[in-house]
Amino acid sequence: MDRGPLAERLLVLLTGPVGGGKSTVALALADHLRQSGRASAVIDLDLVYCMARQADGFGEANTWQTARRGAAALADAFFASGLEVVVVEGGFFSEEECKGLRDHLASSVRERVVTLDVSYGEALRRAQGDPDPTRVGTRDPQVLQRHHTQFVSALPFLNASSLVVEADRLTPQELARLIAETVLADAGPE
């Protein structure tokens, strides 16, 4: 059902732990938004990082900054071509990480940060079932535990600055519907 255009373009920063389902939920969210008549796109911050990285792995802080700038430029291009909603999924665990994208975005948008709160056990279950060969490292329980500890450390910031959704027991489609209803209720029609 088309509900008419949004009053302003919407940028959704979707975050959560490694193995938490961000990519799957982001794609489900964009699909749900498109079915509701909202032209939408998804940017996977990990993929943008991979395009810019200079060494194997994901530990280069300056490359993450470059990836966030690149994601902002890509979001600007999507908005300039008429898309109403851009979902950027990835690690946004601090104000600095959010600003790393936000400060390089030229488009005038309303931003909403959404956090998928996923337990370590569920993240491990999802990671071990992920067939993507590029994610083999995060299937290691110790690696995943280290990443999950970083996520838990960020929860005070995320609870204060984002919509936090308990995501252990909901399907990606249920999460997409819940997120869409919440972020679109804030936006309203033109």
Image: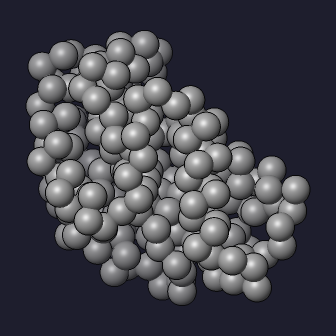
Q: Which of 117 and 146 is in front in this view?
A: 117
Left or right: 63 as drawn, with respect to 111: left
The quadrant of the rendering that contains the C terminus is bottom right
Image label count = 0
Query: Do we see residue 114 in this rendering?
Result: yes
Residue that appears at 43% across and 13% down: 129
Residue that appears at 62% across and 56% down: 180
Q: In which quarter of the image is residue 147?
A: top left
Left or right: 50 as drawn, with respect to 83: left
The quadrant of the rendering that contains the N terminus is bottom right
Residue 85: % across, % down: 63, 66
Residue 161: % across, % down: 30, 67
Residue that appears at 12% across and 37% down: 149
Q: Look at the image and name its color scheme.
A: one colour
Left or right: 161 as drawn, with respect to 163: left
Q: In which quarter of the image is residue 77?
A: bottom right
Q: Nearer the viewer, residue 64 or 128?
A: 128
Q: Is residue 173 above or below residue 61?
A: above
Q: In this view, does 37 lie above or below 171?
A: below
Query: Do we see residue 50 in this rendering?
Result: no
Residue 15: % across, % down: 37, 50
Q: Which of 75 and 3 is in front in this view?
A: 3
Residue 42: % across, % down: 57, 52
Left or right: 67 as drawn, with respect to 95: right
Q: In this view, does 46 lie above or below 87?
A: above
Residue found at the very far right of the displayed protein: 1
Residue that appears at 47% across and 73% down: 111
Q: Quadrant of residue 99?
A: bottom left
